[in-house]
Amino acid sequence: PRLLFDLFFTCILTLVSRVPIGSERQQHSVQHGPCSYTFILPEVEHCQPLKDFQVTNTLQRDSPPEAEPSWQETKLESLESAMENNTQWLQKLENFIQENVRSGMEEMKRAAVHTQTAAMLEMGTNLLSQSAEQTRKLTDVETQVLNQTSRLEIQLLEYSLFTNRLEKHILLQTQEISRLSDKNSFLEQRLLALEARYGKELQGLESEKQQLQELLERQSRLVSQLQGELGSTTLNSTSLQKQQAVLTDTVQQLLAMVNHCNEISNVPKEEPLSFRDCAEIRQSGVTESGIYSIRLPNSTQTVKVFCDMKTRGGGWTVLQHRTNGSVDFHRGWRDYKLGFGELSGEHWLGNDIIHKLTSSQEYSLHVQLKDREGNEAFSQYEHFYIDGEENNYSLHAEHFSGTAGRTSSLTHTGTQFSTKDRDNDRCTCKCSQLASGGWWFEACGPSNLNGIYYPASSSVVRYNGIKWYYWKGPNLMATTTTMMVRPANF
């Protein structure tokens, strides 16, 4: 645009310079293409302007008036010639301007292209730099993605292995659950069968309980009658026992005197007037079983005991004997301490006497049993004694042998004695009240020879009866039980 303006301004100055300067000028405008040209014409002397003359944008030839002077024609011709020359010059000028404008435009285009090319090169360089940076970043990201992909593949493989193990474990658990379900179904069936069975047994026990209650009521009435009769017979029995004791002492003294007379010629010695136990009485020559007086070791106390002179060589001091159920063994601590019953029948010798007797030297315990079918068995313990009352008459029995079971039915060494009014067992159920009688129960244990004596005709298993478990199970159905001791070196 600047170049076009300069060319146009030059053209105007040229035209102005070629026109004579006068006081008054006429102007004519010519439109040619995009350019507009203005011409300033000189005034012809002595020439008056025509009326109503107007300037137009095109060249016009004025029609000469009729009868014009000749100098005017000459002047017009010269003007026309000048106009034609100017027109030709203007056409050349226009061509020149167009060529200059075209060359300028081409130069401007080249300059613009060069400028744009440089800018594009700079932009391309920047783009290449940015592309290289982005490529580097993409490479780093790709490396990170590959590493992350590798870690994910490893984790996926681990998860796959863990899933396989878990599926195997679940399969095993499912099989185990199925097996347990089958077993549970089987146990449920057995439980239902047992419930039905024990339901029937419970009904039988209820009916039997009712019968026993009726029997107990009858027996209570009978016992009341017997107690009245027993009161009168006890006096007679007591006097008879005293007479028997006096006779026994007299016989023992006579026997001692006879032995002394027989041996006085050989070796003079002093015969004792009392014996420590039945073994000494047996060694003195007595062979008949019966009631004898003994003097307890380390004491001046004399007590009567029943001596068994027949079983396995004799010399046994009887501690307990049951044969018909005539004596109630469900008693308290004091009765078991001092002893009760009849020495010639059912009795318990007394824990104090048993302690003093067995703690003086080593004794063996012999337990003789007989059931209602007449079967006999025994259990023997080569070393036996019990502690004093301060230790609740704790049991010590070792070195078991015999035919009443492959193992001992007596509880372990150290078990304390319990009665219905003094519970020393290791069970919260109070075994003496549950199983009846006084005994070394521990946790109720596998034996109790002081339980309730049931008649041989009874076939129902009872937990509170006489028991020697490892011979006949929980219910012995015994007709005779005997516990007796003698020195281990007899």
Image (tube, helix red, strand yellow):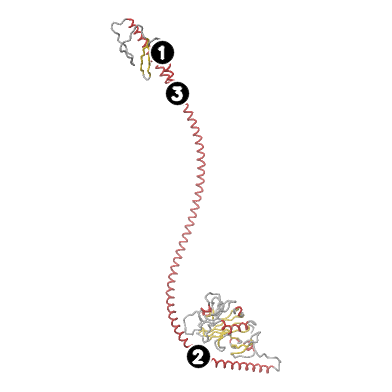
Q: Residues within 10 Å of mark 3 (few under 14, many from 20)?
A: few
User: Closer to the camera, 42 or 193?
Assistant: 42
Judge whether residue 399 can be spotted in this image.
no
Say left or right for 386 vs 111: right
Residue type at mark 2?
A: Gly
Q: Position of residue 110 (x, y in %)?
A: 45, 24
Q: To which quarter of the image does residue 106 belong?
A: top left
Which numbered dot is residue 242?
Answer: none
> Which label's residue is closer to the chain start, 3 or 2?
3
Residue at image point 52% right, 41% down:
140
> Which label's residue is closer to the chain start, 1 or 3?
1
Residue type at mark 1?
A: Val
Distance in Å between CA atoms under marks 1 and 3: 31 Å
Q: Nearer the viewer, mark 3 or mark 2?
A: 2
The correct choice, above or below, for 307 with respect to 42 in the image is below
Q: Which residue is mark 2?
A: 228
| Quadrant housing the N terminus | top left
The correct choice, above or below, for 308 with respect to 63 in the image is below
Residue type at mark 3?
A: Met
> Which label's residue is closer to the chain start, 2 or 1?
1
Q: Which residue is mark 3?
A: 108
Which numbered dot is residue 16?
Answer: 1
The correct choice, above or below, for 379 with respect to 172 in the image is below
Judge whether residue 23 can be spotted in this image.
yes
Badge 1 element: helix
